[in-house]
Amino acid sequence: MAELATIARPYSEALFQAAAHNLESVSSWLDELALIASDAQLQELDASPASTTQQVLDVICGVVKTPLDDQAKNFLRTVIDNRRLSALPQMAAQFHALKNQRSGVFDAEVYSAFPISDIELKDLLSLLEKRFARKLKLSVVTDASLIGGIRVVVGDEVLDTSVKARLEQMKVALTA
C-alpha cells in the first residue's frame, strides 16, 4: 500500500497544481476514473503486453459516463503510458486530501453499529469538530460487529468508543 501511495503522490500533486482553478470539475471526473480503474478486467487489459495505450484509453472513454475534457484525457493517457492505472484510485484519494487541506475540511469516517439519524449526525459532527479541532466531512458506515457505540477515523487518528473495543480492553486487563 505504501508503494502505491508513493507512486500516486507526484501524479496527484501535479494534477492538483494544474487544476487549481477547477478543483470540483477535476474531482468529479477523477472519482469516476478511479472507480473504473479499480475494475479487475481493466487492470488485466492494462497489464497485458499486447494492449496499447490507445486501446486502454478507448475502453475507459467508452465506459465513462461524462465526456472527458482534454485535461482529463491527457492525464489519463499519461497514467496509462506509464503503466500506473492500478494507482489511479490512490491518486484520487491523495487529490481529495490535497483539496480538503486547501479548504480546511477533513474526511472523517464514522463506523456505527446502528444507523445514525440526521439529527444525531449533526450533533455528532459538532462534538467531533471540537474533539479533533478541525472542520470535518462525515461519512457513515454501518458495522454491526461493533455491537454498540461508534468508531471515528480522521486521517491517522482513531477515536473508538465501541462496545467491541471496550470488551477487548477488558479482555486484555483480565488476562494480564
Image: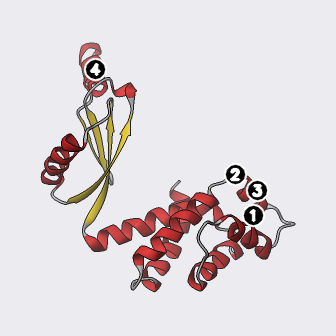
170 lies above or below 160: above
**Circle 3 — which element?**
helix
- Tell me the distance, in whole angstroms, between the alpha carbons under discs 4 and 3: 43 Å
First-in-chain label (4 vs 2): 2
User: Residue 40's mark?
Assistant: 2
Q: Earlier in the sequence, mark 1 or mark 2?
A: 2
Q: Identify the residue position indicated by label 4 in the image.
A: 167
Residues at marks 1 and 2, CA–CA distance in whole angstroms = 10 Å
Q: Find residue 88 and report its horizontal and vertical position in percent.
A: 58, 64
State the separation of the CA atoms marked 1 and 3.
5 Å
Q: Amino acid at mark 4?
A: Leu
Q: CA distance from mark 4 to mark 1?
A: 46 Å
Q: Are marks 4 and 1 in contact (CB under 8 Å)?
A: no
Q: How many marks?
A: 4
Image quarter for residue 33?
bottom right
Residue 20 horizontal side relative to residue 8, left or right:
left
**Most foreground residue, 171 or 141:** 141
Mark before the other along the chain sequence, 4 or 1: 1
The amino acid type of the residue labelled 2 equals Ala
Q: Which residue is mark 3?
A: 44
> Between residues 6 and 70, which one lies in front from this camera angle?
70
- Look at discs 4 and 2 and give the one toward the viewer: 2
Tell me the crowding category of disc 1: few under 14, some 14 to 19, or many 20 or more residues within 10 angstroms, Cα based.
many
Residue at 78% in and 76% down: 54
* Up-down relation of residue 23 to residue 30 (above or below): below
Residue 111 position, x and y percent, is 33, 38
* Residues packed near mark 4 inside 10 Å, few (<14), some (14 to 19) or many (20 plus): few
The amino acid sitting under disc 1 is: Asp
Residue 88 shows in the view: no
User: Which residue is disc 1 drawn over?
Assistant: 46
Outermost right residue: 50
